Image: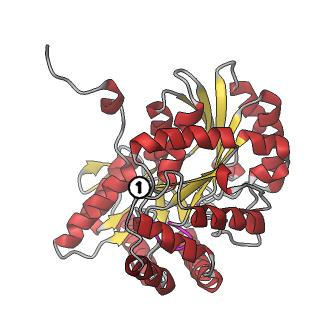
């Protein structure tokens, strides 16, 4: 019998954002300065009080396995955080801690999807959602949005795309990659739709603290018991506390869903890192001043990036109100030439920018947004100025 890989794995597309980051790191290793607009990772250091908590965990000997769903202390701290900040009432038994919000999302899809179940997925969307849904046996159903409408989904279109196989909808606000923030009114409409159709809502709220211009983050699960029962709230500490490498995420849902997620996780990975959990427990007890300062700096960078793009030829963007991304509209450049090559699409453009200008962006095709590139302002103001200037020099050479 011939040896071959599983169709499950060979059918998965690698993460485009991580691929861009890997190439950028290779160039940096060669001594080149790369303007890293690609990966969605805070450039701030993890706050010292959190690092000190990790050292404390080591001194206390907290190096053993933890319960699969997380330590009681961390789950209680998360429950307290959700009640105080999000108007959500969950017991610790309705919370599961995982190896990053990414694992929490995959656990959620595996817990609720059977083969062939459909998941409504507003586009553009984070690159991993479609692949996770497929990995769980589901079918992602694209729900197109328009730049002219702020990349916000239309509930009437959600209804049109709903079938007897529809099992869930993904809500990601603030949004990656568009930076849009779902207004309360839209979330209320989606909640009513989900309750009416009896479908789950997977609500990815990882960027909740990064909102600007007077916008507010509202958790869709906070609109009443009916929608709370249908919703899996996913969050983590990576973006808010600059703890990407610590890999601590969590989900809150009904006890039945959490039990299913815990059963799966018990065989997949067991509990998350014990030291990181202790540090996360300490992180949630403090850090408001740090978060405020970080958000203010992101806001200044956002304004700088948008104002600079507005003055550039060949590209444009709408103002994002959350997260730390701008969707750069590059459609005017597609089909034109640079250095004897044709810019066939955003993927080609991203390769040319990296090769010619050492500027790393993520092509919008990865997010189901052809003609766009996602650029992150989780970089210094100096790199924003110089990196966008490099893009401007590139555009000046396009014929």
Question: Which one is in front, 233 or 134?
Answer: 233
Residue 122 in which image quadrant? top right
Q: How many marks?
A: 1
Is residue 268 depicted above or below 322 in this figure? above
Is residue 353 depicted above or below 286 in this figure? above
Is residue 138 depicted above or below 66 in this figure? above
Position of residue 197 in the picture relative to residue 75 (left or right): right
Q: Quadrant of the N terminus?
A: top left
Q: Is residue 300 magenta?
A: no
Q: Is residue 239 magenta?
A: yes
Q: Measuring from the top left, give residue 67's x and y in whole percent.
A: 50, 54
Q: Residue furthest top?
A: 1
Report the span colored magenta.
238-244
The residue carrying mark 1 is: 362
Question: Which one is in front, 25 or 150?
Answer: 25
Position of residue 57 in the picture relative to residue 289 (left or right): left
Position of residue 87 in the picture relative to residue 239 (left or right): right
Position of residue 293 in the picture relative to residue 214 (left or right): left
Question: Which one is in front, 342 or 60?
Answer: 60
């Amino acid at each position: 019998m011939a040896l071959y890989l599983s169709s499950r794995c060979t059918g998965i597309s690698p993460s485009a954002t991580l691929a861009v980051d890997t190439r950028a790191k290779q160039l940096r290793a060669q001594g080149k300065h790369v303007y890293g607009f690609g990966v969605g990772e805070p450039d701030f250091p993890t706050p010292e009080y959190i690092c000190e908590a990790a050292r404390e965990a080591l001194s206390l000997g907290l190096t053993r396995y933890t319960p699969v769903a997380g330590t009681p202390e961390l789950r209680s701290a998360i429950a307290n955080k959700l009640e105080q900040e999000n108007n959500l009432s969950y017991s610790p038994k309705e919370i599961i801690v995982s190896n990053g919000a990414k694992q929490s999302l995959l656990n959620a899809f595996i817990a609720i999807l059977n083969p062939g179940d459909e998941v409504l997925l507003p586009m553009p969307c984070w690159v991993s959602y479609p692949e996770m849904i497929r990995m769980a046996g589901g079918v992602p159903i694209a729900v197109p949005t328009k730049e002219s409408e702020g990349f916000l989904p239309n509930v009437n279109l959600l209804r049109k795309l709903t079938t007897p196989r529809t099992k869930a909808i993904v809500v990601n606000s603030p949004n990656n990659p568009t930076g849009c923030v779902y207004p309360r009114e839209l979330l209320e409409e989606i909640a009513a739709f989900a309750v009416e159709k009896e479908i789950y809502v997977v609500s990815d709220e990882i960027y909740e603290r990064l909102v600007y211009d007077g916008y507010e983050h509202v958790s869709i699960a906070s609109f009443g018991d009916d929608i709370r029962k249908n919703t899996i709230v996913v969050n983590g500490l990576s973006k808010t506390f600059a703890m990407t490498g610590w890999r601590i995420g969590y989900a809150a849902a009904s006890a039945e869903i959490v039990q299913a997620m815990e059963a799966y996780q018990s065989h997949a990975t067991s509990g998350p890192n014990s030291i990181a959990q202790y540090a996360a427990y300490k992180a949630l007890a403090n850090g408001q001043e740090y978060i405020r300062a970080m958000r203010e700096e992101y806001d200044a960078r956002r304004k700088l990036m948008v104002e600079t793009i507005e003055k550039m030829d060949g590209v444009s963007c709408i103002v994002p109100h959350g997260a730390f991304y701008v969707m750069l509209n590059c459609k005017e450049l597609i089909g034109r030439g640079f250095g004897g090559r044709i810019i066939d699409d955003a993927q080609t453009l991203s390769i040319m920018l990296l090769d010619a200008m050492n500027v790393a962006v993520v092509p919008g095709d990865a997010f189901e947004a052809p003609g766009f590139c996602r650029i992150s302002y989780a970089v210094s103001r100096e790199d924003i100025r110089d990196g966008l200037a490099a893009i401007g020099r590139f555009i000046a050479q396009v014929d």
